[in-house]
Every structure is written in C-alpha cells, then in structure tokens.
Image: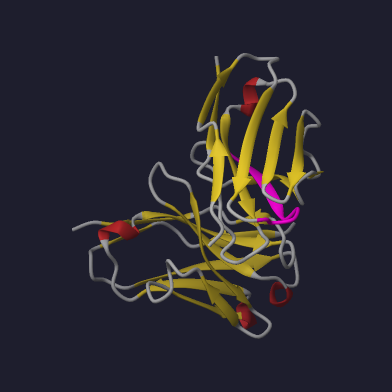
Amino acid sequence: DIHMTQSPSFVSASVGDGVTISCRASQGVSTWLAWYQQKPGKAPTLLISAASRLERGVPRRFSGSGSGTDFTLTIASLQPEDSATYFCQQANNFPYTFGQGTKVEIK
Amino acid sequence: EVQLVQSGAEVRKPGESLKISCEGSGYSFSTYWIGWVRQMPGKGLEWMGLIYPADSDIRYSPSFRGQVTISDDKSINTAYLQWSSLKASDTAIYYCVRPSGVNSAVDVWGQGTTVIVSS
C-alpha cells in the first residue's frame, strides 16, 4: 500500500490567516491526489481533485499543488466555516489510501 | 441529483452477521465504481474495497480481504457490504462512495451507516 503522511496533524489559526497542509506519499502518485474536508458528524466532501483542480462550488481561497510524492493544500484566508478535518487521498494505486487527517481549528 | 443513500444504523452483537446497503440514483449506476470506506470512532478514513456493477469486478484492500464481502444488485442500483461474524472492532461509520472515474477522486459520498457491535 502507498502510505500517505499529512502534516501537521493539528493547526490552530485566526480568521484571515493563511494555512498550509502538507501530504507526502511513500511513492509517486503522479497527480492522482485529492483533498477532502470533513466536518463533525458529516461525510467528507471533495475539495480538490487531480492535485490542483478545484471542485465546483468550492471557494477560491482553497488551492492545491504538487505532483509525485509531495502535495500541499492551502487555505488563503481562513474563514470560520473552514473549521474541519482535512484528508488527502491518493488514487494512483488501489487501495486508494488516505492521509491521517489534519484538524484545523479557528482561534 | 446524483446521490448515494445508505441503509440505517445497526446495532449487533459480536458473532452476528450483517449486510448494509447503498442505493445509487441520478446516474448510470452500472458504469461507475462504488467503494466502501471505514471510519472508526475518532479516526481517519480507510478504503475497504471497490466494485464495478457492470461486471461485478471486485477489488479488496488487503487489510479487509476475507473480513467483509462486497456485492451488488445492479437491477436495483444497490451495492452491499456484509459481515458473516462481526467483532467489536467493526464498530465504525461505513461510507459508500463513488469515484468519478478510474484513478479518480470520490465526488459522491453516501451519508454513512453507523454500525455498533457490542455485547
């Protein structure tokens, strides 16, 4: 299995701050990398696919970058509704493994 | 509207069997893979397996092979996840999911089915 490692596991930031979450794959996954947001008690929702493609309806303050083994999710200006846990997931090789998650808290 | 609607929460005793379901609507059910993802309490997401309803091709994550059975009935646009003998460690939320294509992200998630296994 490809192992996905996210960092940090937890981040606390103020409204308006920029937040960056990293995701590293144990082997190259090209750009078959997605980012999801999960709020408590809800199913995850897709934010970004193919490493950098913003899904319809997702605010432009979210962006993704990277290829191969190193990827980044950036929230340009944190908003209260961005409080959630974020997961990366590779779709290059089955099983399509997830990172362990990064919890974003608003100060 | 494309959606996956899962069966309701279940409470079972260890050793019991269980089958949960996921009905797809708003799209051509047979031509998209359906997957199952586990989320144990307070934990992350684990991919369990995939099924392609058009030909019932099934892929299991090594961690779940032999532990669960994935199946479908494309005549009623429904996928299933079943256990023959539940353990307390099967307590989790189970999501059915639809990747948008091969090697693709999951663009549709079911609402989740909570399974509690307790004596």
Q: Which residue reaches farthest bottom?
A: B55
Who is closer to the viewer here, A73 or B95?
A73
Q: Quadrant of residue B75?
A: bottom right
Who is closer to the viewer here, A52 or B52?
A52
Q: Which of the image's four quarters has the N terminus of chain B? A: bottom right
Position of residue B60 measured from the top left corner of the image (x, y, whole percent):
51, 73
Position of residue A73 measured from the top left corner of the image (x, y, whole percent):
69, 36
Residue A33 counted in the magenta span: yes
Residue A73 counted in the magenta span: no
Residue B60 lies, with reference to residue A5, above or below; the image says: below
Position of residue A87 measured from the top left corner of the image (x, y, whole percent):
58, 43
Residue occupying the point 64% across, 67% down = B24
Give the tally of numbered discs.
0
Residue occupying the point 69% across, 37% down = A72
Position of residue B119 measured from the top left corner of the image (x, y, whole percent):
18, 58
Who is closer to the viewer here, A35 or A45?
A35
Residue occupying the point 56% across, 51% down = A98
Residue B107 lies, with reference to residue B87, above or below; the image says: above
Q: Provide the residue span drawn in magenta.
A: A28-38
